[in-house]
Image (spheres, grey):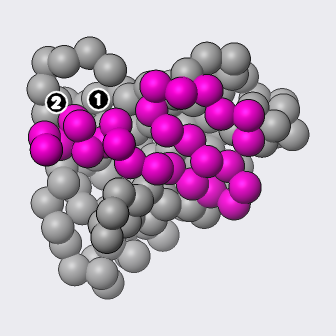
Amino acid sequence: MTRAEAYRRTRYRAGEVVVRVGRRSASAEAWMARHGAREAWFIGAWNPFSRQMPRRWNDAVHARLRRNLRVFEEGDGALGAWSERMLLTVADGATILRLMRRHRQAAVVHVPRGRAARLVYGEDRPSRARC
């Protein structure tokens, strides 16, 4: 399985919110409505560009990411036995892209209100395939 396929198959969760790429999420819609948001994002800082790092290091960069966001909920992305801590947040796209670059993340999950969740790739694209 390619990295892009793994991202698409991952279940993204934060509290009651569950999101899968390519699908709409009623729980995400309700969460965004409570926060007065038109969009939400799942973003993490663990394992930059999908290179596995030690747990202590990952926890430290996750804490730095949290300090850069005002509204967020703790969550994770999981596929099979693999999982990474992530944050569900409301922020503008420019802020998310800046944080993606800073934390060297290959992709984030964009959850626009009323539409299906989608992957947004950063500089380290796993493929040219559209999601």
Q: Is residue 109 magenta?
A: no
Say if 76 sits above or below 106 in the image.
Answer: below
Q: Quadrant of residue 15?
A: bottom right
Density class for disc 1 (Cα within 10 Å; few <14, some 14-19, many ≥20) is: many
Q: Position of residue 16 (x, y in %)?
A: 72, 55
Residue 64 visible in the picture: no
- Residue at position x 69%, y 17% in the image: 114
Residue hosting label 2: 125
Query: Which residue is at a point 69% across and 38% down the rendered structure image?
Result: 28
Q: Is 121 located above or below residue 76 in the figure? A: above
Name the amino acid type tagged 2.
Arg
Which region shows up in magenta?
1-27
Between the residue at mark 2 and the residue at mark 1, the CA separation in whole angstroms equals 6 Å
Q: From this viewpoint, which residue is outermost toward the bottom?
A: 56
Find residue 41 and report its image quarter. Answer: top right
Report the amino acid beneath label 1. Answer: Tyr
Above or below, 32 against 1 in this view is above
Question: Is 19 colored magenta in this rendering?
Answer: yes
Taking the spot 61% from the left edge, 26% from the top edge, the residue there is 24
108 left or right of 101 in image: right
| Mark number, residue 121 | 1
SS type, badge 1 = strand
Picture coordinates of residue 49 (x, y %)?
18, 49
* Residue 119 vertical placement versus 128 (above, below): below
Confirm or deny contact between disc 2 and disc 1 (CB under 8 A). Answer: yes
